[in-house]
Amino acid sequence: QDQKKAYILSFADSHFGKEFVSITNEYDLNIVYNRFNNLLNEVIEIIEECNIKHLIVLALGDLIEGMCLRISQLSNLKIGITQQTVQFMRFIVSWLNKLSEYVEITYYQTVYANHSQIRPFGTKANDFAREDMEQIIFAYITDKLESNDRITVFETIDKYVIFDVFKYKIIACH
């Protein structure tokens, strides 16, 4: 690995739990699994081709669909918010463990997004901004990856993920 290069993989807006079919698009749980597994295979191929030893992974929110933006969105849910959270966090831990077999990982995740906020009906965005399922997903990931010495998880307590690449500050958010 060229020491003058850093590699970052970022993903967001997987909206796990949403299901719909339109004229030009289709989306469901299996499509999320397939897209992440295709991404994993492509990234592993790049890691091997470029001899990458370290990868920064950014998870930037709306990992789940939630169920709180609009009442009309409830009809697009395949599973409820609790199932979305449990299934996605189990899947992503497995996915990260598999990726770590090929590269050392530094993992950052934003813990604030819009779809994953818990919004009692009648409340608006950010009325309860600190009530966000991303925090539960992050806590689970942190706990489950604790024994994997090839993954370093950095806690984000703010709206922004901030880290250094060489001498530059990188700021990311949902």
Image: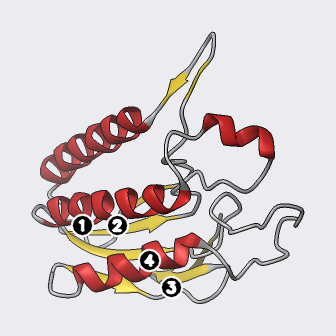
- In depth, the one of 118 and 126 nearer the eye is 118
What is the distance, in whole Å, between disc 1 and disc 2 at their CAs?
6 Å
**Residue with the mark numbered 1:** 2
3 or 4: tag closer to the N-terminus:
4
The answer to whether residue 137 is above or below residue 74 is below
Tell me the quarter of the picture where residue 108 sits.
bottom left
Amino acid on which the number 4 mark rests in the picture: Phe
**Residue with the mark numbered 4:** 138
Query: Is the residue marked by circle 4 packed among few (<14), some (14-19), or many (20+) residues within 10 Å?
Result: many
2 or 3: tag closer to the N-terminus:
2
1 or 3: tag closer to the N-terminus:
1
- In depth, the one of 138 and 168 nearer the eye is 138
Mark 3 vs mark 4: in front: 4
Q: Do the residues labelled 1 and 3 touch (CB within 8 Å)?
A: no
**Residue with the mark numbered 2:** 5
What is the distance, in whole Å, between disc 2 and disc 3 at their CAs?
12 Å
Query: Is the residue marked by circle 3 packed among few (<14), some (14-19), or many (20+) residues within 10 Å?
Result: few
What is the distance, in whole Å, between disc 2 and disc 4 at their CAs?
27 Å
| Residue found 80% across the figure and 47% down from its top | 70
Mark 1 vs mark 4: in front: 4
- Numbered badge on residue 167: 3
Q: Do the residues labelled 1 and 4 touch (CB within 8 Å)?
A: no
